[in-house]
Image (cartoon, rainbow, N blue to C red):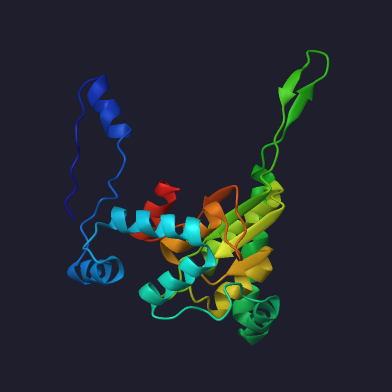
Amino acid sequence: MEETMRILRGYQEGRAALTRRPSLEAELPPAALEWTQAAFGAQLSAAEAVRRIVADVREQGDAAVDRYALLLDGASPERLEAPRNKWLAAVESLPAHLTDALRTAAERIRRFQQSALPKGWRDTEEGYGELLIPLERVGLYVPGGTASYPSTVLMDAIPARIAGVREIIVCTPRPDPVTLAAAHIAGVDRLFQIGGAQAIAAMAFGTQSVPRVDKICGPGSLFVNLAKREV
């Protein structure tokens, strides 16, 4: 493989290269444009479609989440929230070696995060210091549907738990048993079977089922990342 090197000259050129942000304005393929036509009555850009989804979820709550699940995924779950017994059944259904691997990974992540956790301090004589206060509730987005990402659950939820976050919720479309087991092992509090931009909007503004969160983390598609920027 041929490697290339870019030479930057001067402060302004260097600053521009180091502070650049990747564009999220990708052109949608024909199939996606057809979907926007069917859903909104016009061929919208990705950003325009996300803006409408976010606005609808903010105004209509669960009803909009269900509607977009049908439009995007072809089906909406009977219950937006996955019940706890479904998590436990998932743990029991996995082969022992896979459960052991998840628990081993979780324990290693916990030990690392405990060691890396920043500590507050206070100088009573001088009257100053640094106080670290955990967030009350965070929302984690975990991709799903066509693939399984249990490592995303572990790597996002465990640091939040170690930091002292009081409530951790996860949104992921069509969670499989491995993802549900990872949520149980990582100490997630609630898990919602929601994907896409509608999941980000639900966590940002809250719905009848999904509580509003203080911060959203986790990777996702173009629509998910555009929704994060929008909210």
Q: Name which residue lies at 72% across and 32% down.
A: 120
Which quadrant is the N terminus positioned in? bottom left
Identity of the residue furthest to the top in this view: 126
Residue 166, horizontal then vertical, whole percent: 72, 52
- Left or right: where does residue 152 sit relative to residue 103? left
Residue 104, horizontal then vertical, whole percent: 65, 67
The foreground one among 59 and 114 is 59
Residue 165, horizontal then vertical, whole percent: 69, 50
Dividing the picture into quadrants, the one containing residue 46 is bottom left
The foreground one among 207 and 126 is 207
The reply to whether residue 29 is visible in this rendering is: yes
Q: Name which residue lies at 37% across and 73% down.
A: 72
Q: Name which residue lies at 30% across and 36% down.
A: 20
Identity of the residue furthest to the right in this view: 125
- Left or right: where does residue 219 sit relative to residue 130? left
Q: Is residue 59 above or below residue 99?
A: above
